[in-house]
Amino acid sequence: MTQCKITLDDRLLADIVNPNEIDAYAPALAAAEKMLSEHNGPGNDYLGWLDLAEKTPDSLVDAINEKATDLRKKADVLVCIGIGGSYLGARAAIDFLSPSFEDLRSPRVLFAGNTINSDYLDDLLTLLKDKEVAVNVISKSGTTTEPGVTFRVVRQWMEKRYGRPEAAKRIVATTDAKSGALRALAAEEGYSTFEIPGDVGGRYSVLTPVGLVPIAVAGIDIRKLLAGAAQMAGICAGNDAKGGLSGRYAVLRNILFRRGYGIEVMASFQPQLHFVGEWWKQLAGESEGKNGTGIFPASLDYTTDLHSMGQWMQEGVRTVFETFLYIRNTRSTLTVPRFSDDSDELNYLAGKSFEEINRQAYAGTLFAHIDGGVPASSIMIEDRTEETLGQLFYFFEKAIALSGYLLRVNPFDQPGVEAYKKNMFALLGKKGFEKQHEDLAGRMSKAGMA
Ligand code: PA5
C-alpha cells in the first residue's frame, strides 16, 4: 500500500467553508476529472504529464543517469540555462533535496538564462574561471530570447576555454524532438541531446528531461522522484473525483476565489521550499490567469517574511487566502543551548529543537491569520526525500489542472505571455515586427520615453 506523504489539513476552514458548498462542487469536479482522464477537455494535447512517471522508460532514466555520471566526473559546476518551465522545476527539486549552501553541493548546479542581466552573467563567468564546467541548455521551443542570448555567451566562453570539440562534449541540449533552432544547432555541433515530449507543456515538464537531467547531475535519485509521482498519480486517480486530496484543494481554492478571495499566498516554513513556491506560482499563474479570471498566486517564506509582510497578512485587505506548506520531518535535530546567565531570557527554549519552535511558529501564525480574517489551510509534507517531492509535484500539477477546469479556462495554454515578447522584438528591431516598432516608437515618444 502506497504511503501518501502529502496531506491537506483544512480543518480550520470548517467555519468559513460550508460542507454543502464543497458538495455542490462534486459534479463540476467529477466533470473536470473526466475531461482529464478521457483527454477531451480544453488543452487535451498537453496531458502527457498525467502518466509521465509510469511511462518514462527505464532506458531513458539510465541514459540520463549515465550522462549525469559523465558530467559529474568532468565538472565542478553545471550551468543550467533555461527560463520558466525550463528552469523552475529543477531549481525547486535541487533546493528541496540538497544541502542549503551551494558550497556544500558537488557538483554545483548554477542557473542562468532566466534573466536579461549582464552583471549576473559576467559574475557567473568570473566564478567559472578556475572551475571545470559543463552546460545544460534547456528550451522546448529553442527560440526563447533569455536562454538564447545567454547560451551564445556561455557557448563562446566554453569554446574559448576548451576548444570547440571538447566544449561540445560538455554541452547537453534538452529540447523538442525535431523542431527549433536548438535542435538544429545541437545536431550541427554534436551535443548530447534529450527530448522534451511534445505533449507536456513547460510548467508541467519537471519530470521530463527538462528537470531530470540537472536534478540527476545534482546527485539526486531521479528514479525515486518518478516513483513518488507515479504513487501520487495512483492516489489521485482513486480519490480526486470524490473530492480527495488534489480535488479537494482545487475545490476549496475555487470556493474561496468566488467568495472574493482573489489572491492565494503559498506560505512555506522551511527555506528549502522557497523554489517549490516559485515553481507553483508559474504552474498556477500560467494555468489559470486568463480570460479575465484566475487566482493570483503569491508566495512568502516564513518566518522570514512574517517580519516584513506579516503586518499585511494580519491586517491588510481581506482578499487573500493562505495555504501553508510545512515539512513535518526535517533532517537535523539541532536544539537551543542553555546558558546559565540567561541574559537574553531564552532559557525557556533551551533543549527545544528548532523544528519544535518552528512548529509552534506555524501553528501560532495559522491561528493568528485565521483570526485576522484570512482563510487558511495547510499542505503537510512528510519529509525531504525524492519520493515525497515526486508526490508533491504531481499533487500540485493535478490540483491546478482540475482547478483550471473548475474556473472554466484552458489550464494548458499561455497565450498572454506572447504580448511582451512581441513588443520586445519590435523594440529590438526583429525582422517582421516593423509595424509594431513604428506604433510603439510613437507611443514612447508621446509618453516622453524616446
Ligand atoms: O510554461 C511555459 O510554456 C513557459 O514558461 C516556458 O517554459 C518558458 O517560456 C520557456 O520556454 P522554452 O522552454 O521554449 O524556452
Image: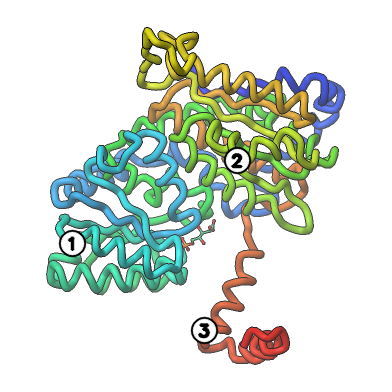
**In the image, residue 151 above or below residue 268:** below
- Residue type at mark 2? Ser
Report how far apart the C-alphas of labels 3 and 1 lie in the structure. 31 Å
The colour scheme applied to this rendered structure is rainbow
Viewer-closest of 378 and 316: 316
Q: Quadrant of residue 403 in the image? A: top right
Please, what secondary structure does the residue beneath circle 2 have? Answer: loop
Residue for point 44% across, 29% down = 228
**In the image, residue 236 above or below residue 290:** above
Q: Earlier in the sequence, mark 2 or mark 3?
A: 2
Please, what secondary structure does the residue beneath circle 1 have? Answer: loop
Report how far apart the C-alphas of labels 2 and 1 lie in the structure. 37 Å
- Looking at the rendered structure, which numbered label has been put on residue 129? 1
Q: Is mark 3 within 8 Å of ligand 1?
A: no
Q: Which residue is the site of mark 2?
A: 308
Q: Earlier in the sequence, mark 3 or mark 1?
A: 1
Badge 1 density bin: few <14, some 14–19, many ≥20, Cα 10 Å: few
